[in-house]
Image (cartoon, rainbow, N blue to C red):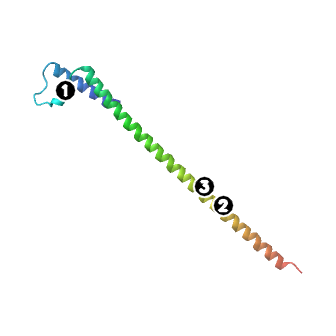
Amino acid sequence: MNNHNEKLLEISMATLEKVAKNELEEDSQDELRALLVDKDTVVGAIGASHDTHLLKIDNREDELVTRINSWVAALMKSIHHDEVARNRKRIAEIHNYIDYVTDQLEDMSPS
């Protein structure tokens, strides 16, 4: 990303030098000529562009991290809920087995 910004700055400075020497092609756009007024204007415009680009990337990263954290929280909640339900079902099975064995023992005991 910084490499792109450095290349853009190099190209802009070379174009600025062409404008200063009046070597810029005649069919160049008026907007380009207006932007290439002086070095400070060019550096400022490129810096602002770079800052805006970095801000968009940071915002996207924040959005992705937020969504991932929400997904992980929902997944963990689901896993916890499923595990609690599985544990309760298993405990109920154990209680039913104990009741069954107790009934069998009572039936087998001499009265």
Any mark on residue 80, and which? 3
Residue at the disc numbered 2: 87
Crowd around label 1: few <14 · some 14–19 · many ≥20 (10 Å): few
Please name which of the two marks, 1 or 3, marks the residue nearer to the observer: 1
x and y percentages locating residue 45 in the rendered image: 28, 27
Q: Which residue is mark 1?
A: 34
Image coords of residue 60 (percent x, y): 40, 41
The quadrant in which residue 17 appears is top left
Asked whether the residues under the numbered discs 1 and 2 touch, taking CB atoms below 8 Å apart as contact, a structural biologist would say: no
Asked which quadrant contains residue 93, the reply is bottom right
- Residue type at numbered disc 1: Ala
Taking the view exactly as shown, the residue that stands out farthest to the bottom is 111
x and y, in percent, of residue 52 in the image: 34, 33
Q: Are marks 3 and 2 in contact (CB under 8 Å)?
A: no
Q: Residues within 10 Å of mark 2 (few under 14, many from 20)?
A: few
Q: Is residue 1 visible?
A: no
The residue that appears at 50% across and 50% down in the rendered structure is 71
Most distant residue in the left direction: 26
Name the side, left or right, on which 5 lies relative to 63.
left
SS for dot 1: helix
Q: Earlier in the sequence, mark 1 or mark 3?
A: 1
Number of marks: 3
Q: Is residue 76 visible?
A: yes
